[in-house]
Image (cartoon, helix red, strand yellow):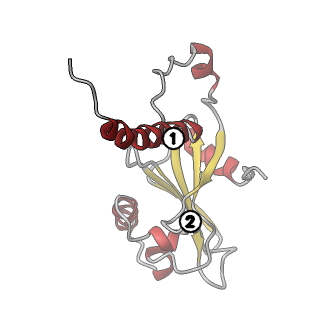
Amino acid sequence: MHTPSTTAIRTARPLVFATQMLFVGLMAIGCAPQPPAQPAPQIQAQAAPQTGVAFLGYLVGKHGQQLTGHDIRNTPPFSTAYRALLRRNKLREAWLTHFNGPGTPVRKVAVSGAEYLHVNGCKAHSCGGNNIEVLYSHETKAIYARLTQNSESRWLGDPSDEIKQAFTQLESVAPPR
């Protein structure tokens, strides 16, 4: 039978200690191997709201800043769907194509359980009568808009009655404080 030398034991002790400390540290921050998670109870899955509109958060950039329509106007797949929507409706105004007027941060919202980006903007110095609100689903690539030009509103993207109602509800959905 082979017995380890005293030198081997002295060399291995710090390594064993360091490994133990690494494991303890990982456990403290939640990175250690965890037992398999139990499936969520059926009741929790059913508790998620499936109707109405809910605020989920803001779309943020890589440095943590809140993004606006101007920031994402050239970012596929949103830009692809948005430009196609404008082309189908023969809209070429710069404030629409470039989102270069005032706007608010892009919000992530849930409409009847489906996640959408809520993007809006308006024509500089004429927001009251010239603005656009967009709902875009990254999952389905569906895009809908409520466009107001010269104080007259119209729908783009053939939204369902449920989506039209969501646009109205979005006006009153505020982020949690």
Q: Quadrant of residue 27?
A: top right
- Front in this rendered view, residue 36 or 145: 36
Q: Residue 154: percent from the left, percent from the top?
A: 55, 60
Q: Quadrant of residue 52?
A: top right
Q: Residue 81: percent from the left, percent from the top?
A: 36, 59
Q: Quadrant of residue 139?
A: top left
Q: Give the residue number, with chain letter if any, for mark 2.
A: 64
User: Gap in Å between the C-alphas at discs 1 and 2?
Assistant: 33 Å
Q: Is residue 163 visible?
A: yes
Classify 1 as above or below 138. above
10 Å crowding of disc 2: few (<14), some (14-19), many (20+): few
Which amino acid is tagged 2? Gly
Which amino acid is tagged 1? Met
Classify 132 as above or below 46. below
Residue at left offset 65%, top offset 71%? 151
Does 106 sit left or right of 136 as displayed? right
